[in-house]
Image: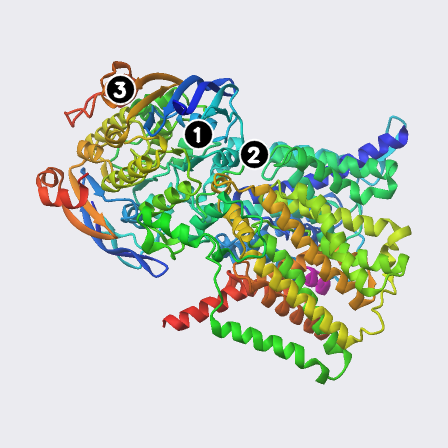
Amino acid sequence: MHRFTLEAQGIQKSFGGVRAVDQVSFGVRAGEMLALIGPNGAGKSTCFNLLNGHLRPDGGRVKLLGQDITGLAPRKVWKRGVGRTFQITATFGSMTVRENVQLALQSHRGELGRLWTPSWRLRGGQADTLLERVGLAGQARRPCSVLAYGDLKRVELAIALANNPRLLLMDEPTAGMAPQERVGLMALVAEVARERGMSVLFTEHDMDVVFSHADRVLVLDRGRLIAEGTPDEVRANALVQEVYLGSGFEPEPEAEASAC
Amino acid sequence: MLSVRGLSAHYGRAHILDDVGFEVPAGQVVVLLGRNGAGKSTTLKAVMGMVRPTAGQVLLEGRDLVGREAYQIARAGLGYVPEERRIFAELTVRENLSVGRRPPVPGLRPWDEARLYGLFPALGAMQDRPGGRMSGGEQQMLSIARTLMGNPRLLLLDEPSEGLAPVVVQRMAQAVRQLKAEGLSILLAEQNLYFAHAVADRAVIIEQGRIRWEGGMVELLNDESTYQQYLSL
Amino acid sequence: MENLLLQGLNGLASASSLFLVASGLTVIFGVTRIVNFAHGSLYMLGAYLAFSIVAHLPRGHLGFWGGIVLAALAVGAIGALLEVLLLRRIYRAPELFQLLATFGVVLVVQDVALLVWGAQDLLGPRAPGLRGSVELLGLRFPLYELVLIGIGPVVLGLLLLLFKRTRWGTLVRAATQDREMVGALGVNQRWLFTSVFFLGSALAGLAGALQLPRESVNLHMDLATITEVFVVVVVGGLGSLPGAALAALLIGELHAFGILVFPKITLVLVFLVMAVVLVIRPRGLFGRAQVAQAAVASVAEPVLGRAPPALKWLGFAALLVAVVAPPFLAGDYALIVLTDMAIAVLFAASLHFIMGPGGMASFGHAAYFGIGAYGAALLTKWFAAPMLPALLAAPFCAGVAGVLFGFFCVRLSGVYSAMLTLAFAQIAWSVAFQWVEITGGDNGVLGVWPDPWATKLNFYWLALGCSVVGTLALRRIALSPFGYALRAQRDNTLRAEAIGINAFGMRWVAFVLAAGFAGVAGGLFAFAKGSVFPTALDIPRSVDALLMVLLGGVQTLAGPVLGALAFTGLHEQLVRATDYWRLVLGAVILLLVLAFPQGLAGAVRRWWEGRRHA
């Protein structure tokens, strides 16, 4: 048993001389929900893309269950057992909900090379089971293009679960959702993660979500890891308050000082 | 100032706005609250002429704007700041601002670059930077500043806090309050209750394309049942 | 040495003209995202109008240069009118539909020019005062060419100033990135677009008018120019003025020196350069990643479903009639047309496979049709192969070409990919045209007759059988896991990669499959006609296939079938009925595009569903 599902060891990446991610090291423990937060432009997205294979790090290593996956293409990272959801929901609009999940299952089973079998004959039942798990059984036959935003997020989750991932990467999973939907989605994710012993690494701007669902929190600023700990520890950290959390909204509505 | 009456819009067969009506009194900040897909953005776009309403009126000081092109509505005094910010990525900060420039309006102190850099000092420090190389928070400021260059009398702000760090959201709230203090009327679409609370005078709750509640912000916070039903965590 | 210098200057002069046309196209594309096929027609109109205007003005400097400027302005006005009447209505239509519309304009302009100016080449006046030549390093060089060389850089400078220094230029650059937002900021973007079209068209007109003293004005100027200009614009990077300038220079000089160095492959050379540039720099020399046009609402492609049962039965009935009826038809003509239709259906279905499910545009699908045709024909001619083995070899030849060309084409996306397919098709065409020893060049391969058992009727049944089986096979593949994976990478490449789909591999396999099926159609075509000419793989044939697919509609599997039948039938009737068939066909295309932006099959389906809901 590995202590960490995923381990980043001193990863770094520069764009045009600017260090977007600078010597960042951390580990995602088995079965934990780990949040990655930080100001806009702190390098969260870059960090994510280094882990999921979309970008190749300039230095450092990424290990999944002890195996080196540094610089592997996204689809190979997926094959090793990393599921992923996108900040802006990404589903296949020309297919029904069920076909979306079916396709991911077929891909996991290596069935995409089949040119002659009708697709609807393969993995339909498994797709339904997954859809039921995320609460979308009733929507299975609708095209993804007509679904409500919150439901699309669930479709994405079902797609991401198709390969029984050891780790789920979620880029701002609740962006664009109403508060009550956010809680519902994250509660579902936490539940599924617990059932499957799956780790979850997510970025998030909604502090309510972070502090109520994360087991641990990482804080990134200007490409560097500036804090790491439990939600309470991070919330109490003076540096994190200064660069990210702020001191709350000013009580006086008629603020005289100019903004920023 | 702005009065929306019986506004409806369709997308294919689906009703996306159904008999939406509310008022934005002069000099006040009104927030449209509701979940994603409830119709907030569509309401703003319909007001701005970017979505064609199938019925209803949008009255700006009594003049109906429905049926006019977006550019005509902008010229009539509405300023629109889109949710996605939609900065011209290859244009510099200064050029972005110049696209928004419109002639001064009698009775309003005209906006110029210097005054905007006073409101958002961060922009002043990067006048020649292309919009595509700015952070999310900076782009949001630029998007607001660019719209202000058109000297609007009423500002439509679509989720200015979306995807921004808490500390940036707090600064954004200060800016909005300052704009209000200068006499601008603002219609805001938001999901961030903290932000809405910090800036708004009145609230309108929209769900599935219909108005469910309308009243003062303070009233809303005290209205336990409404709060529970639509907004609670 | 002297020759080299002279060729170099010649190259500069043509580079200058090329740049003028290309700059107009690239400016228009930058703002409207429309690849304007009719840009070459505007260039041709510039030349014709200049010819007529100069002839009516008094001789002398004023008459000549005034005529040139007036012609350019008139073409600008025509372009603006085109924008207002046609393109403005289809900005939200799919990219290829816009292309189809502009191709309709090409057809119309061709026949209008034929009506007004006649078929014979026209020779314009020389430029007053510039008839002579100057001595440069001991060589005589025509003065007018020198003036031309100067005009290019001057126009480039003026355009750069216009875009960087004026408010109009800033607005245009902003609209290039997000037109709707520009409108929301109070700018009347309609006039902005119309003015951009005026400018771009006027540049094309100016370039055409300036050719007057150099070469004869003729009806082939449009397509000859547009392919060249596409190459320039794509090599330079779509939307980039400096890119267009550099690429014009490159292509101009390549032409000039290519004739000296490789006289045998001059035609291939230009397209080879384009292919190499695109392989190394997928967005051209100066091209940048296209900013997503937020204004154009990306309507999701509909879910592929089964056709309504009634339509399905209608299809079966039609097929039954197609099988049973022909023996009772009088005369060969009907059989010939029916055979053509069967072949066209398969050809269109194969193109649809990569365009619809694959999401790739191909401007050069005729390459695989033609390679299949030549493969079968050459086997028959040089190895006396019987018909059936030759027919089997056709998809093999086309498939091999698909493996090779596809490997490069499917790496790129959008217009660039389409242009690379065009480049490869032109390379294939040039080989067929210039490798006279093997292919017979322009004279074609003759005597490709079917085996004795294959009478006109039997051959028709063979063609129909291949067509039906091929089309159904493509349909089945589209609905297999592979077909879904193919659509997945079209819908959302990032998402597809994130569930383990190898987008490149999927596209490549699809490309090869489509090439193979096009090859079958080509092989049948060779035996149906008894001969193969380079026209089997030229641009008009690729455009025919595009027309069939787009007329029928990309979104449905039945689309290409309907489109192929409608197009072949229409084309056949028009050619028989009138000399001005292009005019009518062009007008029909324009009407269809304006009336049914979703294609025929889409319109039928919507009408059907609407009726059911009503």
Q: Nearer the viewer, mark 1 or mark 3?
A: 3
The span shown in magenta is C110-116
Residue B131 badge: 1
Instruction: Please state the total of marks drawn on the protein image.
Output: 3
Mark in front: 2 vs 1:
2
Of residues C197 and C529, the one nearer the viewer is C529
Q: Does residue B96 show up?
A: yes
Give the vertical position of C193 relative to A202 (above or below).
below
- Give the CA separation, mark 2 to mark 1: 15 Å
Amino acid type indicated by mark 3? Val
Q: Chain of mark 1?
A: B
- Tell me the amino acid under the disc marked 1: Gly
Secondary structure beneath dot 3 equals helix
- In whole angstroms, how far apart are the C-alphas of marks 1 and 3? 33 Å
- Give me the residue at 85% from left, 33% from top: C6
> Which of label 2 and label 3 is nearer to you?
3
Report whether mark 2 lies on the same chain as mark 1: no
Q: Secondary structure at mark 1?
A: helix
Question: In this image, C149 relative to C359: left or right?
Answer: right
Q: Is residue C90 left or right of residue C515?
A: left
